Amino acid sequence: MKKYKCNVCGYVYDPEAGDPSQGIPAGTPFESLPDSWTCPVCGASKEDFSPED
Amino acid sequence: MQAVKIKEGFYWVGAIDWKVRNFHGYSTTRGTTYNSYLLLDEKIVLFDTVKHGFEEELLTRIATVIEPTKIDYLVVNHIEPDHAGAFLKVVSEIKPEKIFITRNGRLGLIEHFHVKDLPFEEVKTGTEVKLGTRSIQFIETPMIHWPDSMMSYIPEEKILVSQDAFGAHYATSFRFDDEVDFCELLQETRKYYANIVYPYSPQVAKLLQTVKQKGLKIELICPDHGVVLRKHVETILRYYEKWSSYTCDPVMLIIYDTMWKSTEKMAYAVMEGGMQEGIEVKLRNLTVADPTELMAEVLESRGLVLGSPTLNNGLLPTVSGFLTYMKGLRPRFKVGAAFGSYGWSGESLKILNQYLQEIQAEIVHEGIRCKYAPTPEVLAGCQELGRMVAKRIKETCSG
């Protein structure tokens, strides 16, 4: 599962860890995040993320 | 030290920092101010505090209007220490009933001060607080320029308390934009955008769009640094539109440094080429250029030509230092090229081109490197490089 980085603030979404602050369980791939999910650091939307190399 | 009346019932009660010249690396050549505003209604509100060390100035000014303990609400639009450094001291003095702040702001303040049991009340875009005859509408502005940032709009007065946006590091005894020299104010506003706000231009563009869509009427912009805008609101909004849309002027900015004048000779030849095309060229040597001022020129110049000799298989430290800084500020839509001399290995050109790629510049020439000292042929090539960049600048600025 790929990690995705926020283009705005640099936060990295790690699917292994999920995002407990928004109720996203560990093991959730980035692609499966709901469209309403936003960057937990800066509030940027999903489209502001790029896959990490 | 007095409060300054901005409007009936609305006062500036901040602090003027005449002496600061280095603000975490930003060269504040004209000093700065830390602005706080006091709103008197049935509920009394203080918007933001000041930097640590200026608490007494703030409290003294407040006391010229009201007893500080009479303040009911504290609004924390931004938690950076130049505005929240005095937070704990001010809270202990005024004992506010409520502290309005974003979620990120609350979490950030707790991490700054390690205190949790304060009367924080989280607000979001759209949250409205009635004060009596007036109200506050909060607008979250994440990453303009920290995750916690927000603005406070007072619709009945058409006042936008804009925290760092639209501000400038500019110490003056005057509080309004029409009392100071507009060229000075614009210089400092441009510098502020380039060095603080630039990376978040897409967010600024969205915010300006929202302001337009909502038809927000703004008579006064009250930022956290510099003067209150009342005469030049439209003008500064237009400049923010220009900068946040990466609109540039047809200018070629040559940024370089040199060891034994070889790279400098190349820089002059590039400049010559640019001048032959009739556009403005600015030559900036990083041994003498102020990086903060230089970023203001990067902001508005379409063309960016970088020069460095190779030193120990890398760049000169002045060049790598500046480019590291510049890259973080995310310039976009530049037209660029690079050049540099070397003695044996010659890595500088490749590294300079990598920097241009990282800021997604359009590289219009593969670049020129020259061993030891440039020959007339090399200099002719540099002139040609300058002409090519200048032509592309003209093409991209004409539409």
Image (tube, rainbow, N blue to C red):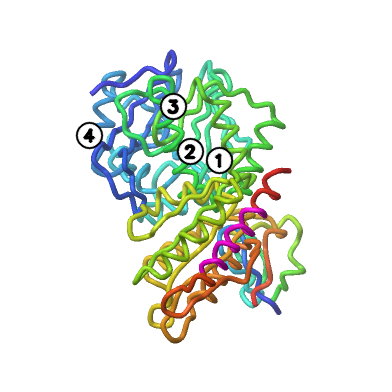
Tell me the crowding category of disc 3: few under 14, some 14 to 19, or many 20 or more residues within 10 angstroms, Cα based.
Answer: few
Q: Is residue B79 above or below residue B160?
A: below
Name the chain letter of the residue that bears numbered label 4. Answer: B
Residue hosting label 3: B182
Residue hosting label 4: B56
Q: Which mark, residue B100?
A: 2
Is residue B252 shown left or right of residue B213? Answer: left
Tell me the crowding category of disc 2: few under 14, some 14 to 19, or many 20 or more residues within 10 angstroms, Cα based.
Answer: many
Q: Residue furthest top?
A: B8
Task: Name the one closer to the observer, B219 or B170.
Answer: B170
Question: From which residue to which does the magenta span run?
Answer: B379-392
As measured in the structure, the alpha-carbon distance from the residue carrying label 3 to the one carrying label 4 is 30 Å
As measured in the structure, the alpha-carbon distance from the residue carrying label 2 to the one carrying label 4 is 23 Å
First of labels 2, 3 by sequence position: 2
Amino acid type assigned to the residue bearing label 4 in the image = Glu
Q: Is residue B18 visible?
A: yes
As measured in the structure, the alpha-carbon distance from the residue carrying label 2 to the one carrying label 3 is 34 Å
Name the chain letter of the residue that bears numbered label 2. Answer: B
Residue at left offset 55%, top offset 53%: B199
**Which percent across, then down, holds residue B384?**
60, 63
Amino acid type assigned to the residue bearing label 1 in the image = Val
Residue hosting label 1: B123
The answer to whether marks 3 and 4 sit on the same chain is: yes
Q: Residue furthest front?
A: B376
Q: Magenta: predominant secondary structure element?
A: helix
